[in-house]
Structure formats: C-alpha cells, structure tokens
Amino acid sequence: MSAPARDRASRPSRRPGPVAALRGALHQWLERPLTSLHLVLAVFGLLTALGLVMVLSASAVSAYAAGGSSYGVFARQAAFAVIGLVLFWLGLKIPPRKLRAASPWLLAGCLVLLVLVLVPGLGATINGSRSWFRVAGLSLQPSELTKIALALWGAHVLVRHRPHPRTWRAALMPLLPVSLLVLALVLAQPDLGTTVSLMIIVFALLWFACAPLGLMAFIVSSGVVASVVLGTVATYRQSRITAFLNPDEADPLGPAYQARQSLYSLADGGLFGAGLGQGRAKWDYLPNADNDFIFAIIGEELGFVGAGAVIALFATLAYVGLRIAARSADPWMRVVAATLTVWLVAQACINIGYVVGLLPVTGIPLPLVSAGGTSLALALLSGGLLANFARHEPEAAAALRAHGQGRLARVLGLPEPSLPRAAATDRPTPRDRGR
C-alpha cells in the first residue's frame, strides 16, 4: 500500500456537520409515508388555533361596544370551528370514490341555494351583498360551499373518459357553462371577492387537468379583462382601485383609509410586536380588523415574527397540498388536491397582498384565520379532504394497511384506505399540455 493510501486509511471518517445532519434528518422524515398527513393536520390545526386567538383579540373592543360582551364574535367563531372539525372529520372519513360520485348532486344543491339566497325574504344582506342565510342566529354563506363543490365536480368531469383534455371542447364542456352560471349567480349578490375565488378554482382545474396552453392564455386574459370591468362598474370598487394606483392623492379619510391604517398597524408591530391584545388599531382605527384586515392585527401584536410565521404556514400548505397531488395515483384526487391547495393559498396571497399594500382592497378573507364562520368551517372541510387524499397516497395506504391505522383512527371510525388502481403512467406529461 502506498504512503498516501495508508494516510487516507488512517484518517478518521468525517462526521457530517450540524447543517448536513439536519438536512439528512429532514429528508428522511419527508420520505416517510405518512408525512403528508401529519403536515396537513399540523398546518390546519395551527392556523385554526391562531385564528381563534387573533379573532378574540381583534374583535374584543368592537364586540363589547356592540353587545356588551368582548366574546360575542369569538363565541360564534368558536362554534363554527366546532362545526368545521366535524366537517374535517367527514372529509377525512368518506371514501374518495363516494365523494366523486356525490359531486354532481352536491353542486346541483349549491346552485339551488345560490338561487334561493337571491330571493327577498330568504337571503339576508350583509355588507351590501345578499349572500347569506340566517338560521338560528347564525349566518351561512352558500357560495363558500360552492367553491368546494365546483372543485370536486369540475375535476370529475375533466378526468372522466379524458384524463388529458387536449382540445378546447373537451376541456370546456360542460365545465364552462356551469362555471359561468355559478359566477353569474354570485355576481348577482354581488360578491366580487367570491367571484375571484371561483375564477381561481376554474383556472386551477383546467391547469392541473393539462388543458391546452392556448386555452389557459385565453382564460387568463379574459379573467384580467373581466376583473377590470367589474372593478370599474361599481363606484366603490373604482374608488378603491384609484386609491391604490394614486395613494398620495387619495382621500386618507375616504377610500384609502383602510389600506393606510393597515400599514400603520404593521409599522407599529416592529420585529416582535406590541404584545397579544395590546394593539391599538382595533380600537376603531382599522375597520374590519377581525375579518379582512386581521393580518394587520397579527403584524401589530405579534410583529414581523408572527406575520412571517403565518406566511410560513401557508407556504407549508402550498408544499404539502402539491405534494399530495404529485403522489396521488388517482387522477381525480390529483386535480382536486391541487385545486383546493391553489384556492386556499391564492386567497391568502390576495388577502396579505392588499393588507401590505401590494394589491387593491378586494374583501377576500384570510383562510382559517379571519372571522367568518362559513369560511372557517368549509376551509376545515377542505383540510379534511386533503388529509383523506394524503391517506390514499400509495405508500401511505400500503403502510396503513400493513401496520394498522392506530387507536385514534379506530376511535374516529376511519376506514382503511384503498390501494390505488390507477397506474402512474396515467399521469399527464408536459408534452400533453401543448397538444
């Protein structure tokens, strides 16, 4: 043996540094079969808990002024959180094939509700929109359920008999006429924020079903034109856009008031915030502090660190949702998981965008965090569906069937996930998108 070889053999093996060891441990954990399920449970649990705490903090002053109790808005939000947990359990429990089979009936029921909510005497008007039913003191918004129903049914029609909709006709029929009907009913309320969310869902459905690129470009351009038209036909929307484009010339006590106050709140928070419950903006300085602008209260009371944690949680939601879609063998579950993920994360991006001044105010709440019972409950239903699809990943389903589901799954009555029947070769390729 040569001298250099003896020297190499005599040297002790190098141990990986802490960064390399951490990276290796993270990689091993991400490769475990149930990681997607655990991430879904963690993200939705943390965002819901944070939302309840921040709704209590942001609404305490206005709730006391309106009803003599600081817990009025929080109590309603907590009640809907309980309903949402039940919906999460149902979304986790129902087999995906039954969900797919029921999707046409669910969407048909939502269409009936969207018509009934427009009938005077049945629908209630809140904040200028006839979008609500009042039942036993609770306000229910059928358009929120319609988002999930449209995602389930749209994925069903896109993957049925045509896993790769390569032509405009295959991609749009019957998705386009039904989507236009839903959008027309929501616009009649009128509710521009929900309309934008529905347009995002339709775009995500077509994108992840690999519709032709020409069609996607046409839809994007049509959506931009429609958004501009809808933003200018109503005076209050036009004033918001004008205030966004010319903030220095806008009336600080008029259309620019909310956007400016939200920036003041974020600036007051600094790095670590003023402390939970110690914010000043909720003392009637920032309208809708517990709803549309709750991210400003988070930034004021929890600082840059708290606001960054919220953004990190939604980034994790984007990762895990697309991970579930990529690992699913069933094409319907792939499209639904990706669409629900894009919807929730896009809503969060729009909300945070207009709170920090990057977008005009649109009135879209922050999912799972903003006050709004129907929105919270149905966002949790979406989380249950994502958790269900995570359990049906091929590796996860095999592990659960081989080693058992555990005591908690038995208590919740969760059935064993079925092994995938679709082959991995059914996955659309980049070449299919261009055809």
Image (cartoon, rainbow, N blue to C red):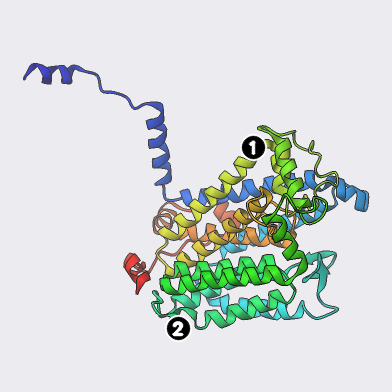
Q: Nearer the viewer, residue 169 or 245?
A: 245
For image coordinates 36% across by 68% down, the residue present is: 428
Q: Residue 169: x percent and y percent?
A: 45, 83
Residue 368 visible here: no
Residue assigned mark 1:
304
In this rendering, the answer to whether 337 lies above or below 249 is: below
Q: Nearer the viewer, residue 180 or 19?
A: 180
Q: Secondary structure at mark 1?
A: helix
Q: Nearer the viewer, residue 64 or 423?
A: 64
Label located before the other in sequence (2 or 1): 2
- Disc 2 crowd rating (10 Å Cα; few below 14, some 14-19, many 20+) is few
In this rendering, the answer to whether 17 lies above or below 7 is: below
For image coordinates 42% across by 73% down, the residue present is: 214
Residue 239 visible here: yes
For image coordinates 55% across by 71% down, the residue present is: 202
Rendered-image quadrant of the N terminus: top left
Please give left or right for residue 27 compared with residue 218 in the image.
Answer: left
In this rendering, the answer to whether 280 lies above or below 420 is: above
Rendered-image quadrant of the C terminus: bottom left
* Residue extending farthest left: 1
Residue 169's mark?
Answer: 2
Q: Nearer the viewer, residue 67 or 185?
A: 185
